Amino acid sequence: MIRVLLLVKGKGCRDDLIFFYHFPFLFSFISFPHPLIRTTQAAMADKEATVYIVDLGSSMGDCHNGRTESDLDWSMRYVWDKITTTVAASRKTWTVGVVGVRTNETDNPLQEDGEGYEHISVLQELGPMNLTSLRNLQALIKPSDTERGDPISAIVVAILMIEKFTRKLKYKRKIVLVTNGEASVDPDDIDDISAKLKDCGIELVILGVDFDDAEFGFKEEDKSSQKRINEKVLKELVDKSDGLYGTMAEAISELEIPRIKPFRPYKTYEGELTLGNPQEHKDAMSISVERYFKTHKATIPPASRVVFSTEPGHSQTAEGDAMEGVEPTGQFAAVKNARTYKVNDPEAPGGKRDVEFESLAKGFEYGRTAVHISESEYNITKIETTKSFTILGFIHQEKYEPFFNMGESCQTVAQKFNDAAALKLSSFIHSLQELGSYAVARIVTKDGKDPALILLAPHIEPEFECLYDVPLPFAEDVRSYQFPPLDKVITVTGNIKYEDHRLLPSKELSEAMDDYVDAMDISNWAKDEDGNRTQEYAAVEDVFCPPLHRVNQVVRHRAIYPDQPLPPVAPILLKYSKPPEDLLIKAKNKLEDLIEEAKVKKVPPKAKGRREKGRKPEPISGLDVDALLSQPQNRRKKVDPENAIPSFKQMVETADEEYEIEEAAKQMGAIIRSLVTNSVGDSGYDRAIENIGALREMMMTMEVPAFYNSFLRDLKKRLLSGELGGDRRELWWRLKGSRATLGLIDKNVFEDSDATPEEATEFFRK
């Protein structure tokens, strides 16, 4: 058999629409690559041409080695995953082609050039891939009725497709062959084919169903002689072309490992980094620099709202009304949002009147009112800024607090191909490093942008130097809270105690905690290739964002199998959701010692509800305070207005009859109304709201929501009528803002409530 290797002048690629997946926000951090990348390398990485060769012989429809799915369906897991990843990327420069070998028909550009190319069909021409073409391709991937067809000839067809499409342009070229090795393979010309692959820069990957792989640890028993010979031939071809060869089981096992999306360096600033004013002082420093993202939030593509088409197979999207970023299909119809603006108008039908967007003005909230600022005045209030990057001063590293880091980090490097700038920046970086200092700078990335303060930290590697930066907070961004110290106790008399106090750990307890922390150390817990624990466990590059990759996994699966249930969460995404089991076993003894030294005891469950009290567990101390308080002579008969909440709870908890609970609720209600009535302005509102919350909580606990609902209805009536010391609508607004925790107790919260969910919703609207 004679194979013909042709070099055909390529034509332009198709301009198909690309399908975008849109899903809700969730994030992880992206680490951007080294910014000083050659333009040619970046362009080459952005263009890909991949041809998948799929063996569709009749034997691919059989099941082997205990699998319940056919060899074809099992192998296509890998192919579909790769193709859907390309579709989801929505890049027109990432192109895909599919060739079927051992097909019933023959449809390829070399079928007229001689024997050897029968039963090879081009199922998908090389070009951009979208969801529609993916659906069409799925219908073609099924086992044929023949065993004829040569996979090596299919590789020649794939080489021709790539040459024709990519021509001499810079592309990352790749051919992936998926086969079970049962077809007859002609070993002639493999030297010429491997040379052609290397000459064209095409990477050849051959994945075989149940192929022997010593490194992966798989060997098929009872292998046919034909398959054994084919494996040797294909392995020889891969070795001569410097490609990759493996068993399909290994490829499928690696599909669950999340793939980090490559990102091109994004330039946030390009200009001068200055120290002083170069326009006024000749000695001022000015360096031409470029600033790039180092970490940036990785978000899941947002979801777009669509509606199922009422007419199957017919798209309802009218020309010019296509939803932006979404490929029109017959299954869904686009949804367009329309917003209207209304104002109250008693003379208009329904009491509301539509207004045009152009007639709206900006109003800023000021208390309970709005302050109008016209567009012209609003522009004047904005700070006029110009693009700049200026160093304001320096700070010693030991004086910088790490909690000042405000967000995403960037890296600043010298301007490309500017040796003078590189020398200046290198000198500045080394000076900061030697002095142990950071630089504080003000940056405005574009004219009119808000200024930001950033901290510049030097970073030096053998082949790379840069300034890393993080945003710094303004005064309004810092939250300062005072907490009691952990290493000492200040008594009411002013004495300071550092030991021998119930709130301070003993020496033995501190040592037990130290031992437990050391036992749970994961810095060297991961095993290396030799099985020794020398590597860091949960390193940053190994920890993936579960929501991000889970949604991507689900989207890819649903794109391929729209009617199948969703797959389970990949184990690697849950790997770091809890400590490693072997580490817990190792630290178990230390934990038991810590529990014993700290005298940790199980707390009895809290009794909930009057009907669930029953027999309470015996207190650990042996002193039953509840029993003492429940004795007739010790029972509280009145809620103390000066200590309302504790006395109210004590009165309710010791009540035996429902009328006693009702009496306690009435007394608490009277105290709340008194607080509102005697409040000067809003001085008593906070205490009143706190008491209302306690009343609601106890009535729910004792399963008598009607007492609280009755109180709240009466309070609303009194507030809005002015009975409680005048205009108290400010308190009513506060109650509306806390409707979830202070509203009526409806049937959704408590089944026996006298308030419906609809009534609870309308309660704050009137």
Image (cartoon, rainbow, N blue to C red):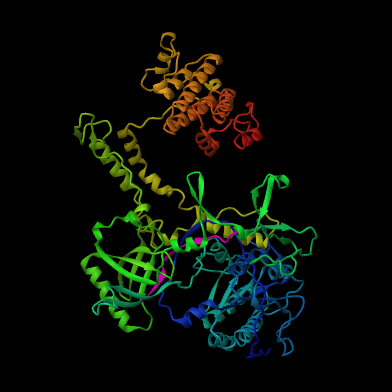
Furthest toward the top, the residue is: 633
Identity of the residue drawn at 25% across and 61% down? 397
Q: Position of residue 82 (x, y in %)?
A: 59, 68
Q: Which residues are magenta?
A: 289-303
User: Where is residue 731 drawn, in percent x and y?
Assistant: 50, 34
560 and 458: which is toward the camera: 458
Q: What kind of secondary structure does the magenta stretch mostly adopt?
A: strand
Which residue is situated farthest in the left direction here?
A: 495
Q: Is residue 550 left or right of residue 76?
A: left
Q: State yes or no: residue 298 in magenta.
A: yes
Name the image quarter holding the C terminus. Answer: top right
Furthest residue in direction front, as rendered: 347
Establish if 385 lies above or below 366. Answer: below
Q: Residue at x 53, y 21 (%)?
A: 610
Please tell me whether residue 128 belongs to the stretch shown in magenta: no
Q: Residue 266, image x and y in percent? A: 46, 72
Q: In the drawing, does residue 550 fall left or right of residue 606? A: right
Q: Nearer the viewer, residue 629 or 272?
A: 272
Using the rendered image of the protein, determine whether residue 602 is visible from the camera's viewpoint.
Answer: yes
Q: Nearer the viewer, residue 29 or 650?
A: 650
